[in-house]
């Protein structure tokens, strides 16, 4: 099965290594451009491909790139944490379709920042493998797994949990994919959520004169706690003040106190 691999990020590299260990036939690689990449050089090195079989995500709509990918006679496309939308012209090149690994429990949290919106919108979190169609994260689902959101999760800790679950789910599903006839289920048209990347801009600024419940405010701040990146903030006297939330269980707090030096009373 000849595969074009569309990859980015740590999980993109992890899955590619898994495929190589299992003798998958990777005939082409598509990577994010330098300014938007994570693990780009590692993905290229791991692929072992020549430069003429490695493509830039920004060039996917060009006819020359489409022709070059078609010339590789691909059968299946694998999109792993790949941040670009597939156009019909690209999808038509794959007789066995394109599969996407999405860190959300579809149909909830299609689109960007599923880790944020599972907390803010109080929607189920999880990971899914689905076929790519003309919509955004709307294709038939092959497999999925829910990931619990704990009261002390932040945007960062939930993101890491979703990464780990993504890797495990793909590896467990790979045999069914290779067999060529995985069981699929359509997504519901009557439920689910979708967010654009820019949607976080609408929640990051906290109006100090707006009334919220304590739960809503805590959920917003913890969802946007993802150091070192900026998140929620308020403005005072023309200056922005950014907020991050540290959430500790009683046992974690006790352990932290034990390691601290007792202040000198004098």
Image: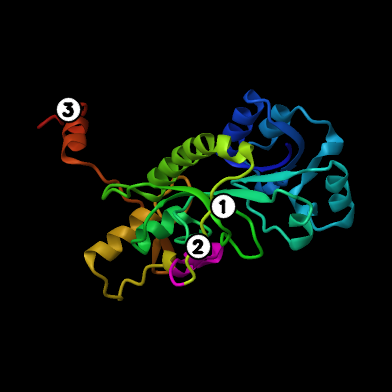
Quarter containing the N terminus: top right
For residue 119: magenta?
no
Above/below status of 168 relative to 6: above
Name the residue that disc number 1 marks: 130
Left/right of residue 38 with respect to residue 256 in the rendered view: right
Above/below status of 185 relative to 156: below
Name the residue that disc number 2 marks: 187
Marks 1 and 3 sit apart, C-alpha to C-alpha, by 47 Å
Marks 2 and 3 sit apart, C-alpha to C-alpha, by 50 Å
| Image quadrant assignment for residue 259 | top left
Marks 1 and 2 sit apart, C-alpha to C-alpha, by 10 Å
- Say which element carries label 1: strand
Task: Please say if the residues under marks 1 and 3 sit with CB atoms less than 8 Å apart.
Answer: no
The residue shown at (39%, 53%) is 125
Name the residue that disc number 3 marks: 258
Q: Position of residue 72 (x, y in %)?
A: 84, 41
- Viewer-nearest of labels 1 and 3? 1
The residue shown at (80%, 53%) is 59
First-in-chain label (1 vs 2):
1
Task: Give whichever of 7, 254 is nearer the camera.
Answer: 7
Q: Position of residue 40 (x, y in %)?
A: 68, 37
Left/right of residue 29 with respect to residue 197 in the rendered view: right
Above/below status of 59 relative to 173: below
First-in-chain label (2 vs 3):
2
- In the image, the segment drawn in magenta is 190-202
Task: Please say if the residues under marks 1 and 2 sit with CB atoms less than 8 Å apart.
Answer: yes
- Say which element carries label 3: helix
Label 2 crowd (10 A; few <14 / some 14-19 / many >=20): some
The residue shown at (62%, 28%) is 17
């Amino acid at each position: 099965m000849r595969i074009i691999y569309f990859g980015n990020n740590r999980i993109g590299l992890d899955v590619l290594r898994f495929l190589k260990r299992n003798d998958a036939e990777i005939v082409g690689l598509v990577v994010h451009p330098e300014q938007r990449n994570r693990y780009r050089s590692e993905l290229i090195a791991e692929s072992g491909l020549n430069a003429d079989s490695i493509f830039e995500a920004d060039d996917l709509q060009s006819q020359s790139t489409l022709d070059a990918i078609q010339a590789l006679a691909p059968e299946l496309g694998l999109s792993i944490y790949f941040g670009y939308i597939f156009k019909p012209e690209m999808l038509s090149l794959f007789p066995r379709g394109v599969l996407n690994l999405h860190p959300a429990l579809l149909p909830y949290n299609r689109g960007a920042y599923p880790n944020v919106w599972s907390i803010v919108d109080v929607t189920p979190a999880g990971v899914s493998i689905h076929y790519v169609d003309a919509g955004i994260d709307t294709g038939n689902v092959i497999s999925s797994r829910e990931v619990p959101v704990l009261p002390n999760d932040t945007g960062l800790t939930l993101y890491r949990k979703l990464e780990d679950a993504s890797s495990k789910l793909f590896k467990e599903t790979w045999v069914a994919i290779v067999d060529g006839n995985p069981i699929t289920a359509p997504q519901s048209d009557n439920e689910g959520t979708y967010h654009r990347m820019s949607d976080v801009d609408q929640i990051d600024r906290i109006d100090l004169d707006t009334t919220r419940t304590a739960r809503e405010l805590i959920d917003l701040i913890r969802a946007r706690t993802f150091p070192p990146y900026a998140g929620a903030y308020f403005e005072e006297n023309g200056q922005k003040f950014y907020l991050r939330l540290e959430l500790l269980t009683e046992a974690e707090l006790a352990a932290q106190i034990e390691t601290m030096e007792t202040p000198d009373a004098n």
